Structure formats: C-alpha cells, structure tokens
Image: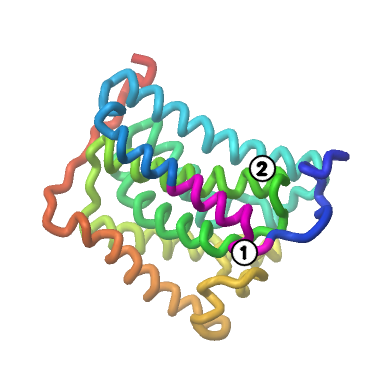
Amino acid sequence: MNSPSFSLTISGEPFQPFSLPHLLALAVTLGLLLLLYLFRRQLQAPAAKRAFRFALAGVLLLSEVAFQLWHVLTDSWSAAYTLPLQLCSVTLLLSVIMLLARSYRVYEIAFFAGIGGAAQALLTPELFYPFPHFRFVHFFVAHAGIILACLYMTWVEGCRPTFRSVLKTMGFLNALLVVALVANAWTGGNYLFVSRKPDNPSLIDFLGPYPWYILSLEGVAVALFSLLYVPFWRKTPASVPAERDLSS
C-alpha cells in the first residue's frame, strides 16, 4: 500500500506512550464508556439493545478482519505474529460471540480477561505506528470495543460476575497459555508474551526475568480480577439467556 496511513513502514516518529494522540485516544475511550453508562437505561429498550449489540459486534469483527487483511495486502502476514492468539485478540472474538449470543458463560470470562487485558493494553500499548496510521486506529478501536462490550453486558443486559467467574477465567487463561506455548514453539512467535517480554515498556518489565514473570503474571491476574469483582461482591448475580433466533 502506498498511502502512509496504511504502509507497512513507519513515516516519521514511531508511537510514543502518553503522547498527545495516546492521551486523546484514552480520553475518547473514557468518553464512550461514560456515554454508555449515562444512556444505559435508554439502551434497555429491546430495539435499542439489539441494534447496539449487533453494531458493536460488527465493529469488533470488522476490526479483526481489517487487521488480517492489512497484513495480507502488505505481505506481512505471518503465523508467528498475526494468528488471533494474543489475549486481546481472543477476548475480542469472545466479545463478538458474547454480544451476538447474549451468552452469560462467555461473559464470565470476557469480563475479567477482556477488561483486564484491554485496559492494560490501552495504558501501555504494544504499538509502533503513530496516529493517523491504520494500526493506531485499529488498536484503540479494538481494545476500547472489548471494554465497551463487557460493560454493555453489565450495565444494559444486567449480567453480574461471581467469584467462580474469576476461577473460570483463570482456568481458561491457563489453558490458553498452553495453546500459546505450542503455537510459539511451532511458529517462533510470542503469543501471550509467554516466550519473551514485549518490546515496548509494560507491566511485565517489573515482574522479574523470563520465565519467572509468567508466575508473577498469574498473581497479578488473580489480584486484578479480584479487584474487578469487588463491586459485585454482595450483589446477586444475573444471567442472560442466549437468543435462539437473533433475527427475531
């Protein structure tokens, strides 16, 4: 692609954490979350819920398709880097399923893994392309969309996680870790960052050398998920049955 906004090579300075574009992207994300909360009651109308769910699921799915297509068109697609095995890629796909099926079982995992992973990614992006490059826009749309999807299910659909949801999420992540290790050995990649630390500064830098930081990440995940669970500690959990006919 010849356009600088879609080129594989970076024109100008690479992305800088907490630069003005980064801060503006975070501000837009917070603004969208605030709007979702303020209009949560209006969105509870059946037609509004259906429209929002399908629209958000469409944006998330389109972002993943566009990401894969960009790699194909720039001849940069590689099994080592572009399989949907990073945590946020997995939770993005889970979020699409959760929204379309209104699945409480998927919500239990997406809520903790999605919000925890996407929030950390937004604050410390593994990103090199600056604004207005496609990869910059894709990164923030995808990660903000994951959080919006999880909080939509909470604020509008009435889902509530339980402490068992924390345990289920940890079980899912450890199973995913095994898949990532196998994929990394096969492709030479670094999915879930379980083969080496990410190149950009991140929380992992404070968790010790390889491979011990993986154990530290387990502790951080339990602490973070427990913190996310605190607002629901004494509340009665609610589940949402899956829609059998999404066209009705």
Is 237 left, or right, of 208 in this rendering?
left
User: Which residue shows up at 68% across the image and 42% down it?
Assistant: 68
Nearest to the eye among marks 1 and 2: give it: 1
Q: CA distance from mark 1 to mark 2?
A: 21 Å
How far from the left and from the top, in percent, is residue 181?
57, 66
The quadrant of the image that shows the C terminus is: top left
Q: Is residue 20 magenta?
A: yes
Q: What amino acid is at disc 2?
A: Phe
Q: Quadrant of residue 159?
A: top left
Residue marked by disc 2 = 67
Where residue 106 appears, x then y in whole percent? 35, 44
State the residue at coordinates (84%, 39%).
3
- Residue range of the region highlighted in magenta in the rendering: 16-30
Quadrant of the rendered image containing residue 115: bottom left
> Is 103 drawn above or below residue 196 in the view shown?
above
Residue 18 place in picture, x, y as percent: 59, 63
Q: Secondary structure at mark 2?
A: helix
At label 1, the amino acid type is Pro
The residue to which callout 1 is attached is 17
